[in-house]
Image (tube, rainbow, N blue to C red):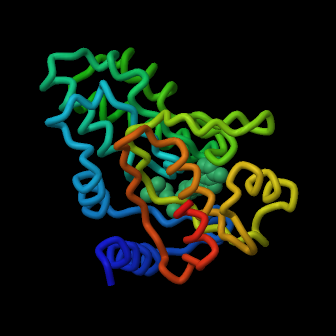
Amino acid sequence: MDVATAVYAQSVSIVGSISAPPRQETRGEVFTRRWVVDLILDLAGYTSDRDLAALRAVEPACGEGAFLGPMVERLSRSCRAFGRPISDSAHSLLAHDLFGDNVERTRTLVRLTLAKEGWDAADGGGLADQWVTHEDYLLNRPGYLGLFGRSDDGEADFVIGNPPYIRPEDVSYELYQKYRIACPTMLGRADVYVGFYEAALRSLRPRGSAPSFAPTAGCTTNMAEDFDR
Ligand SMILES: C[S@@+](CC[C@H](N)C(=O)[O-])C[C@H]1O[C@@H](n2cnc3c(N)ncnc32)[C@H](O)[C@@H]1O
């Protein structure tokens, strides 16, 4: 078992044993534990000894902010280390979530984290609203031009997060067709997370990094071939 698979299995089993309210099944929610988040951020090179305000990181499906909170801490410490105001990082983070309650929880977490880091409340509020967006990542990812055509121009140096795990039967037919147009590697009965991998890879800049979680049983041969291309 590789590191990513081990980490995924660990987080699923622990989160699953705490609680499994019904909404999680259709939202594909598995929130990530802090030590797993720190490991992934370190492996991705999202570390505060780098000038993170000069780079762009995307969290495709932020949930309650398990990744975004620690990312904001690292970005804040990087700004201090490089003598930048936090306002320099207005375009350095972008998080999406499909559900308004998750967006509001994550915005609150961002505000609290920036306040704890000693930044002005006015800066914190503005950045929280700008960084955390109430959008479907597959249809609004950076660089995607929707039904008018696909842009492969990379817009992100990092795409970091834990995608939703949603079976096709839990998505409306119309929405699933839009996902297939946006993400052609969603072949057969592909789970929605397959689209998240494709969208992340398409939106990366050269030398960008997109660590993710992968249930190995879900990686079909067809999908792997398309990713190779
Ligand atoms: C597995 S959870 C992970 C949340 C967070 N990244 C973490 O690691 O704790 C996936 C999240 O994806 C969100 N989601 C589902 N479909 C989405 C979509 N199409 N676009 C953006 N977010 C979506 C859900 O609200 C859910 O909170």
Q: Quadrant of residue 122?
A: top left
Q: Nearer the viewer, residue 112 or 214?
A: 214
Q: Total of numbered circles in the picture?
A: 0
The residue furthest right is: 174
Query: In percent of the image, x 43 and y 54: which residue is there?
Result: 161
Counting from the top left corner in percent of width and height, residue 185 is at: 66, 62
The reply, left or right, for residue 29 in relation to residue 117 is: right
The reply, left or right, for residue 204 in relation to residue 29 is: left
- Quadrant location of the N terminus in the rendered image: bottom left
Counting from the top left corner in percent of width and height, residue 204 is at: 46, 42
Query: In percent of the image, x 54 and y 39: which residue is there?
Result: 104
Counting from the top left corner in percent of width and height, residue 155 is at: 49, 33
- Quadrant location of the C terminus in the rendered image: bottom right
Q: Quadrant of residue 198?
A: bottom right
Query: In percent of the image, x 50 and y 39: which residue is there?
Result: 95
The reply, left or right, for residue 188 in relation to residue 160 is: right
Query: In percent of the image, x 33 and y 73: which residue is there?
Result: 7
User: Would you say residue 180 is visible in this rendering?
Assistant: yes
Figure quarter occupied by ligand 1: bottom right
User: Would you say residue 99 is visible in this rendering?
Assistant: no
Q: Quadrant of residue 85?
A: top left
Counting from the top left corner in percent of width and height, residue 4 is at: 35, 71
